[in-house]
Amino acid sequence: MLIDSHAHLLDERLKDHIAEIVGEYPANDVEISVEIGADMQSSRGAVALANSYDNIYAVVGLHPESAESATDKDIEEIAILAKNKKVVAIGEIGLDYHYDYDKTIQKSVLIKQIMLADKLNLPIVIHLRDAYQDMENIFAECKNYINNGVLLHCYSGSKEMLDRFAFLDPYYAFGGAITFKNNNRADVIRAVKKDRLVIETDCPYLTPEPNRGKINTPNNLKYIAKRMADDLGISYEELSELTYQNTKRFYRIK
């Protein structure tokens, strides 16, 4: 069975079909999905959704695109939400320099949430885009506050960056992009320690082949698993068990 480590079922394109989507999990080898918050509304929603389904867990936090509007009161509410028993991490938090978000504010909000996660003894789920050097610097500066695990979601970095992040021994999640014909990530995937490999859909985004162009759901996770298995030269069953155990370990799902 598979675990989708990063999903957005509450997205406008999916929220009215959640029961149907989750109902199709068993037929598509999916056992669990993790609903990811990106702002206050989606973080609250993630907790409510997780409380409604035994096989959905929640991650709460403020995405870089939410940083400019974030307040100390928001951070306090994230701390309250994170005490729910179905919340398994703080995220998705991080840095995104692809868009014109204020970099200083992004860094400040990220650091506050790293420290919050440490206080709550929770791992962190990182969104990282076009900001590798600054993220490396923040990881180094905050190393003493990162004690419960790091997952770099939708990892798009190089093999060289794996070495630069090695001091944190992070987990790396790969999604639908690894199935695209022009995006061969096999060398990077093979360079990640096997006990740190995780898969995700990031639905409704990044739909894998053969369904690229359609709205993504966790029920496409099997295509990502099959491609990663091929890249590693192992069976689909081995890859499923490997990523299943890795994801449960990272999120501390019993």
Image (spheres, rainbow, N blue to C red):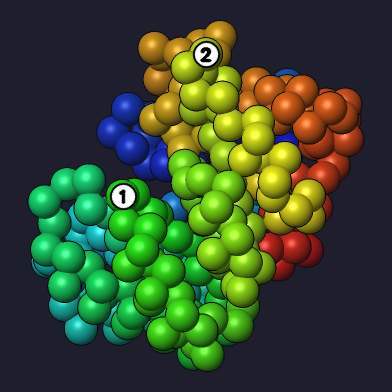
Residue at mark 2: 181
Res. 130 mark: 1
Q: Identity of the amino acid at label 1?
A: Asp
Residue toward you, 71 or 64: 64
The residue that appears at 45% across and 33% down in the rendered structure is 203
Quarter of the picture holding the C terminus = bottom right
Residue toward you, 170 or 6: 170
Quarter of the picture holding the N terminus = top right
- The x and y percentages for residue 41 are 27, 57
Residue toward you, 33 or 135: 135
The residue that appears at 41% across and 13% down in the rendered structure is 214
The residue that appears at 29% across and 79% down in the rendered structure is 75
**Left or right: 203 with respect to 188?**
left
Structural distance between the alpha carbons of marks 2 and 1: 22 Å
Question: Label 1: how many residues lie within 10 Å, few (<14), some (14-19) or many (20+)?
Answer: some
Q: Identity of the amino acid at label 2?
A: Lys
**Left or right: 9 with respect to 13?**
right
Q: Tag 2's secondary structure?
A: loop
* Residue 75 to residue 244: above or below: below
Q: Tag 1's secondary structure?
A: loop
- The x and y percentages for residue 17 are 43, 27
Residue 110 falls in image quadrant: bottom left
How many marks are shown on the rendered structure?
Answer: 2
* Residue 26 to residue 33: above or below: above
Which badge, 2 or 1, comes first in the chain's sequence? Answer: 1
